Image (cartoon, grey):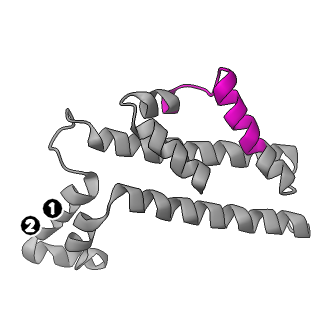
Amino acid sequence: EEIASEYRRVLIAHRDAPRLFAEQAPTGPHRIKLYDAAVGAFLDAGLAAPEAVAMATFYRNFLLGMIAEEARQLSPTRRGGLRPTVALGAELSHLGDELRHYPNLHGAAELLTKIEPEKLFRLGLKVLLDGMECRVTESAGGSRR
C-alpha cells in the first residue's frame, strides 16, 4: 500500500506522467526495476511465474488507470470542470421524479459528490490487494478455479 501511495503521489505531481506511464510499456531501467520488483513480490508469495507476471501486470494497470484518471480530473483543461462522480451526482439531483427509474441510485447524489479521488484510490487498492491475497492463499493451498 505504501509503495502504491508513493507511486500515486509522484505521478500526480508531474502533469503528464500518469498519462505517459499508462500509454507506454514499462521500458527503461527504472520502470523495468519497478516491474521486476512487483513480479518478485508475487513469486515470493508462492505464485508460479505466469500468474506472478499476470498479477503484476494487473496491479500495474490498476494503479496507472486510477492515477491517470485522477490526473485527468485535475487537469485545468478538462471539460465541465467536475469530477465524474460529482457530475453524476449533479445529474441525479436534477432528475426529480425520473430518479425512480434508477432505484439503486436513490440517495446517491450527495454521496457521489463527496467521493474524493484519494479515498477512491485507497478503496480500490484495498479491494485489489485483498483479492490478490486470497488468490495467493488459494494458490498455496493448491486449489484452482
Residue 46 sits in quarter: bottom right
Placement of 47 over or under 102, stated as above or below: above
* Circle on res. 91: 1
- Residue 135's spot in the image, x, y percent? 75, 64
Residue 14 sits in quarter: top left
Highlighted magenta segment, given as a residue range:
22-39
The secondary structure type at the circle numbered 2 is loop
Amino acid bearing label 2: His
Q: Are marks 1 and 2 in contact (CB under 8 Å)?
A: yes
Amino acid bearing label 1: Glu
Left or right of 31, for residue 103? left
Q: Give whichever of 124, 92 is nearer the camera.
A: 124
* Circle on res. 94: 2
Q: What residue appears at the point 70 percent right and 45 percent down from the top-left corner?
A: 56
Q: What residue appears at the point 44 percent right and 29 percent down from the top-left corner?
A: 17
- Magenta stretch prevailing secondary structure: helix
Q: What residue appears at the point 17 percent right and 74 percent down from the top-left corner?
A: 99
Left or right of 128, for residue 95? left
Other residues around mark 2 within 10 Å, as few (<14) / some (14–19) / many (≥20) = few
Is residue 53 highlighted in magenta? Answer: no
Residue 19 visible in rendering? yes
